[in-house]
Amino acid sequence: MPLVNWFKRKFVVIAGLLTLAYLLLPNIVVTVFSFNEPKGRFNYEWQQFSADAWKDPCGVSGLCGSLSLSLQIAFWATLGATALGTMIAFALVRYRFRARGAVSSLIFLPMAMPEVVMAASLLTLFLNMGAQLGFWTILIAHIMFCLSFVVTAVKARVMSMDPRLEQAAQDLYAGPLQTFWRVTLPIAAPGIAAGALLAFALSFDDFIITNFNAGSTVTFPMFVWGSAQRGTPVQINVIGTAMFLVAVLIVLTSMVVNNRRNKQKA
Amino acid sequence: MKRSSRSSLGRDEMKTTTDAGGDVRLSGISKTYGSFTAVHPLDLTVPQGSFFALLGASGCGKTTTLRMIAGLEEPTSGTVHLGDQDVTALPPYKRPVNTVFQSYALFPHLDIFENVAFGLRRRGIKSVKKQVGDMLDLVQLGEQARKKPHQLSGGQQQRVAVARALINHPRVLLLDEPLGALDLKLRRQMQLELKRIQTEVGITFVHVTHDQEEAMTMADTVAVMNAGRVEQLGSPADLYENPRSTFVANFLGTSNLIEAEVDSRSGEDVVLRAGGGKLVLPEARCAAPTTTGGKVLVGIRPEKISLTHADDAGGIPEGRNRITGTIAATSFIGVSTQYVVDSAVCPEFEVYVQNVDRDTRLAPGAEVVLHWSPAHTFGFDAEQAIDAGLDEEAAL
């Protein structure tokens, strides 16, 4: 019986740890296999420890080029979608205009529509317009599907903002520009940051829409997919692990900064 | 509270506070939203240095009027003057006026110090430390300077909102229901506090409230608003003693209203017929034409009425208005007893009697005579609704 009691007391902790393991196991496998030295072309079975791939992450031809391209596209797509999405969110919350309800629903269409459908119709559109498939078509597509996510994130924040804060700023001698920089933007910032992070992750990660509209250009997800047909170089795991570590680092830094700020206040 | 700090405003703020610089003059100002008229054309002058209250139920246009003074609402017609300056076309950030908002509207991302310094910094004043420190001391929040607004209690937040507005030495301070979110005890305390600050700094305060007690205890002058119009304007005592409409009579305190008919005149007084009896009303206290046979409403405050048991009716002095009735209910409050009396002229006559010598015969069912001095009676046009202003108060 003591075992049952112990289990009862620790149940929440055990469930939490199991869930965490479920979430992190794939990352651990990726990390472990980034130190593998596979015998064949496929990195699916553990052979022996080797740090070769870490020493030469760009050793596979085309990998680092595709990675750099993906990062560039993600950067510009994030910038474009965040700027546009923030403005749309403010317009939808703050202003009453004709067809506001319709616009509000249409914005969410890209989120609800199957990606494959959107990808195919975008391709049709680009081809009919005679557009050259490549960096720009990918970027346009990414900004489009990131937009709805940014709008959702920012809108939630703006909706909870008291419009009287901006009136108070104006009442206290802040002109429209000052009101925006000093009050509106700082308060909306968490929503905008969340939208931007989401946009970056979605853009960097996207395969289906990119694959349809890339032409001969190859992004990182496309490279991984392509090489998976012929064999998986260990370097893919190295890049994956590095990305994971960077993300963890960012989260940890922001936590430390926040903690310090709270301590200073107290 | 240095005057030099205001130099960057660049207007005539160097004038001393005793000139007409803080007069607020609204001329024919109105506001309509589509087909709804929030404020009917309105003329109002708030004298420099006064504590002025706009009193009314929610939706009466008082907040809209305040926001038009602040510049946060554009008037449909009319002008707003501050002293000699026409500010109607100026945006809020160019008006020497500051507002304390109902929800305080403190900037959540800035600490208390920066909230209070906000107005000074926007006007390009670099050394704000001393001024902000002094201002925080004035509202007794010197210790809280580095806290964020959400770490403060409601009363403290309210004081920050006042400090943030006052530090700019506005010519007029606008207060939009600033005490509405506070509990009763704190509200009483803040009423005194605000009154003290106003006396200390001598700035014109325009205070919007739906709480008649708050308006009466704080303001020098009260404008009672109803449905986008000012019903009556005057000192609290004047409004209470001489209401000019049923709305004011019912919204401010309690009034007993009796329907009566003009019978005759005797000198300065009008003699009225109500039920079987006669009532006397000084003509000067009647806000309606008093042609013989005309209908008027007669009002009397519950505390002005004396209550005498029918057996002692002989002892009532001559010349007082009398009504007979039966006590329907009594409630003992402590300092006073409230009676509800059934009479032929008014079904529920309210009477408040101080508990000096309690007459034990005055119990439900007892026959009584109500009597009061004609000088305390007021009268209005019978055309208006007898219960105007009652629902509004009940709804709050």
Image (tube, grey):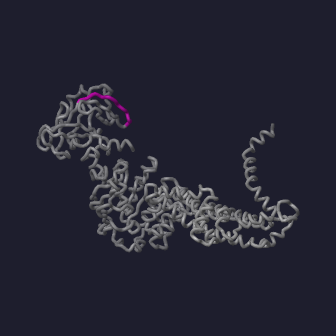
Quarter of the figure with the C terminus of chain B: top left
Magenta segment: does it hold B173?
no
Q: Residue B328, can we see it? A: yes
- Please tell me which residue lies in front, B173 or A53: A53
Magenta segment: does it hold B328?
yes
Residue B208 at x, y = what percent?
37, 54
Q: Please state the extent of the stretch shown in magenta in the rendering.
A: B324-334
Report the number of discs.
0
Name the residue: 36% across, 43% down. Answer: B393
Residue A129 at x, y = what percent?
57, 69
Residue A166 at x, y = what percent?
46, 62
- Please tell me which residue lies in front, A118 or B186: A118
- Please tell me which residue lies in front, B32 or A33: A33
The picture quadrant where one finds residue B67 is bottom left
Is B50 displayed left or right of A209 in the figure? left
Please tell me whether residue B266 is drawn above or below residue A53 in the rendered image: above
Is A235 displayed left or right of A138 in the figure? right
Residue A227 at x, y = what percent?
77, 66
